[in-house]
Amino acid sequence: MVSTEERDGAAKVAAPLKGPLVRYRVLAYVTGVALLLLTVAFILKYGFDSAGMMSWAGVTHGVFYMIYLVLAVDLALKARWSIKGTVLVLLAGTIPFLSFVAERVVTHRVEVGRKL
């Protein structure tokens, strides 16, 4: 069980990171959904010879992933993450479902004041 002092201390540590964390979380979810759509587009193209989704799914994920990279690096610099942790979070946007997992881990660690 976490004491009130520990919880308040974590909230004070996370307060300057609140904006960058919210921006990161939104883009982590958007990037994850875009990657799932791209995965469906690949399955449709190569499994069913239907390339309709490929024309927009790849571009959509690419744009969101670039924004995700910028926001994740911004959060990493402000939260003083290690290079290894930063690279792992950046790569999370390239593997289906992993951006959702990384978002949960990052959110938890930032909220309790732990570095990645």
Image: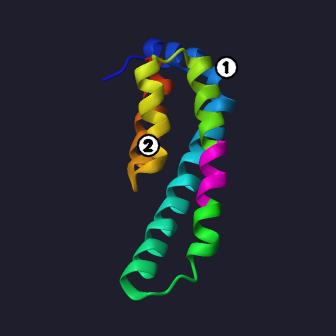
Element at badge 1? helix
Q: Is residue 76 above or below residue 92?
A: above
Q: x%, y% of residue 61?
A: 59, 58
Count of labels shown?
Answer: 2
21 within the magenta span: no
Residue displayed at 49% across by 87% down = 50
As drawn, the label of residue 6 is none
- Report which residue position mark 2 lands on: 92
Q: Residues within 10 Å of mark 2 (few under 14, many from 20)?
A: many
In the shown orientation, is residue 11 left or right of residue 3?
right
In the shown orientation, is residue 32 left or right of residue 3?
right
- Label the magenta part by its dominant secondary structure: helix
As drawn, the label of residue 16 is 1
Element at badge 2? helix
Q: Who is closer to the viewer here, 10 or 34?
A: 34
Three-letter amino acid code at the position of disc 2: Ala
Q: Is residue 98 above or below residue 107?
A: below
The Cα–Cα distance between marks 2 and 1, rounded to whole angstroms, is 24 Å
Three-letter amino acid code at the position of disc 1: Pro
Q: Residues within 10 Å of mark 1 (few under 14, many from 20)?
A: few
Dividing the picture into quadrants, the one containing residue 62 is bottom right
Q: Is residue 45 above or below residue 58?
A: below
Q: x%, y% of residue 102?
A: 42, 40
Q: x%, y% of residue 34?
A: 55, 61
Residue 54 visible in image: yes
Please state the extent of the stretch shown in magenta in the rendering.
61-67
